[in-house]
Image (cartoon, rainbow, N blue to C red):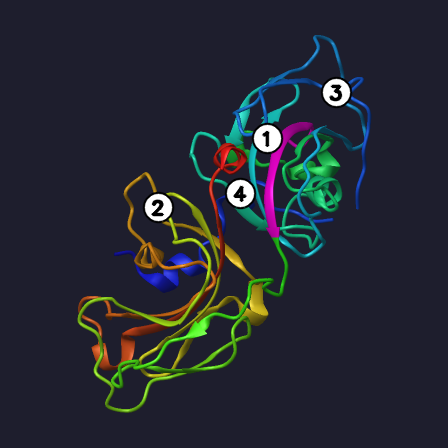
């Protein structure tokens, strides 16, 4: 099983392609590329021959959703497709991966055009955006994605959901009769917990899952994107990584179709809204008494693709 700390510190895939910074522009569809396909379906984009991209950000809502509005600072969950305006080349999309992406919005963690266009949009919406270079990757472009510094970009985004800094879920029901020989966790639901490993606590030889408090949500399903807050410490009490007070809630896939296991797969079947403790053994050759890992996870939500959410 992949090392937890490494997984948690890895950037969200979409942020590798849409990283940048920066309010809400809207425009009629005139002069914008044509988009075919329903919300949730992989879109097809057609730019009118001879049409030049505008020098400013152009956006339009192709389908208006009825869900809550995305707020600045939320973790946005969405399916998306991005292409280069001039060539039509698709450089990235989530539809083929059959898993949505999650990223902070409105706080400079994505390209400026995304921050400006998506704050205030209602969940369930499909948004078309044309980004000039200054609203995308700027003069440097993104060579890894084949994007030049002069390239305008086209994005179609299906907004699925968003999550604020505070959980809107009810407090879970605390478990009773917890094992004695395990890390100790204190703190209220939704707030940063404290984790301590009493001296002499037996380190795990295999992953151990303990539900500290049971939520009232649906069981976590394979293939979904899980929305979590977490904190991880070593068996020796060393802080490893956390989202509380740092990056905020994070989206992680569970039961991924590529078959690559990760520690969050241990949460499959547990109810959304739960607080869970994972005890993970140290890597081979490491000192189990020092390098085993204790992780507390608050499960804030789960989302399938836009198409799955539409049909549910």
Please state which of residues 180 and 232 is positioned toward the viewer in this rendering: 180
Q: Residues within 10 Å of mark 3 (few under 14, many from 20)?
A: many
Which numbered disc, 2 or 4, marks the residue that appears first in the sequence? 4
- Mark 2 and mark 4: span between their CA atoms? 21 Å
So how many labels did they put on this image? Answer: 4
Task: Give the numbered dot on residue 32.
Answer: 3
Q: Nearer the viewer, mark 1 or mark 4?
A: 4
- Mark 2 and mark 1: span between their CA atoms? 34 Å
Question: Could you tell me which secondary element the residue under label 1 belongs to?
Answer: loop
Q: Is residue 25 magenta?
A: no
- At 65% from the left edge and 55% from the top edge, which residue is drawn? 74
Vertical order, 144 against 104 (above or below) = above
**Residue where numbered disc 1 is placed:** 147
Say if mark 1 contacts mark 4, CB within 8 Å: no
Question: Could you tell me which secondary element the residue under label 4 belongs to?
Answer: helix
- Mark 1 and mark 4: span between their CA atoms? 15 Å
Q: Give the image quarter of residue 199.
A: bottom left
**Residue where numbered disc 2 is placed:** 222
- The location of residue 142, given as percent across then percent down, is 58, 36
- The location of residue 282, given as percent across then percent down, is 24, 70
Q: Nearer the viewer, mark 3 or mark 2?
A: 2
Say if mark 3 contacts mark 2, CB within 8 Å: no
Q: Nearer the viewer, mark 2 or mark 4?
A: 2
- In the rendered image, the residue lying farthest to the bottom is 199
Question: Could you tell me which secondary element the residue under label 3 belongs to?
Answer: loop
Please state which of residues 198 and 213 is positioned toward the viewer in this rendering: 213
Which numbered disc, 3 or 2, marks the residue that appears first in the sequence? 3
- Mark 4 and mark 3: span between their CA atoms? 24 Å
What is the span of residues highlighted in magenta in the rendered image?
A: 148-162
Q: Is residue 152 magenta?
A: yes
Left or right of 130: which side holds 219?
left
């Amino acid at each position: 099983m992949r090392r937890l700390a490494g997984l948690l510190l890895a950037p969200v895939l979409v942020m590798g392609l849409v990283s940048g910074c920066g309010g809400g522009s809207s425009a009629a569809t005139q002069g914008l590329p044509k988009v075919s396909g329903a919300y949730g379906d992989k879109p097809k984009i057609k730019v009118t021959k001879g049409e030049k991209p505008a020098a400013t950000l152009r956006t339009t809502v192709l389908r208006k959703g009825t869900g809550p509005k995305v707020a600045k600072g939320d973790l946005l969950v969405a399916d998306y497709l991005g292409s280069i305006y001039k060539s039509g080349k698709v450089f990235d999309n989530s539809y083929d991966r059959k898993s949505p992406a999650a990223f902070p919005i409105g706080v400079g963690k994505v390209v400026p055009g995304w921050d400006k266009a998506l704050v205030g949009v209602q969940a369930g919406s499909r948004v078309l955006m044309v980004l000039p270079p200054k609203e995308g990757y700027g003069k440097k472009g993104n060579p890894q994605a084949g994007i030049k510094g002069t390239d305008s970009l086209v994005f179609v985004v299906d907004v699925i959901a968003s999550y604020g800094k505070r959980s809107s879920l009810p407090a879970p029901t605390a478990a009773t009769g917890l094992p004695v020989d395990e890390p100790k966790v204190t703190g209220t639901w939704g707030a940063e917990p404290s984790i301590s490993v009493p001296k002499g606590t037996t380190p795990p030889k295999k992953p151990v899952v303990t539900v500290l408090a049971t939520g009232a949500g649906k069981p976590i399903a394979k293939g979904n994107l899980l929305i979590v807050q977490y904190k991880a410490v070593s068996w020796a009490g060393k802080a490893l990584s956390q989202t509380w007070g740092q990056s905020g809630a994070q989206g992680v896939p569970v039961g991924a179709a590529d078959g690559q296991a990760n520690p969050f797969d241990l949460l499959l079947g547990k109810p959304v809204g739960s607080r869970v403790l994972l005890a993970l053994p140290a890597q081979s050759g490491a000192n189990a008494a020092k390098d085993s890992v204790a992780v507390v996870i608050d499960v804030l939500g789960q989302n399938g693709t836009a198409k799955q959410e539409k049909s549910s």
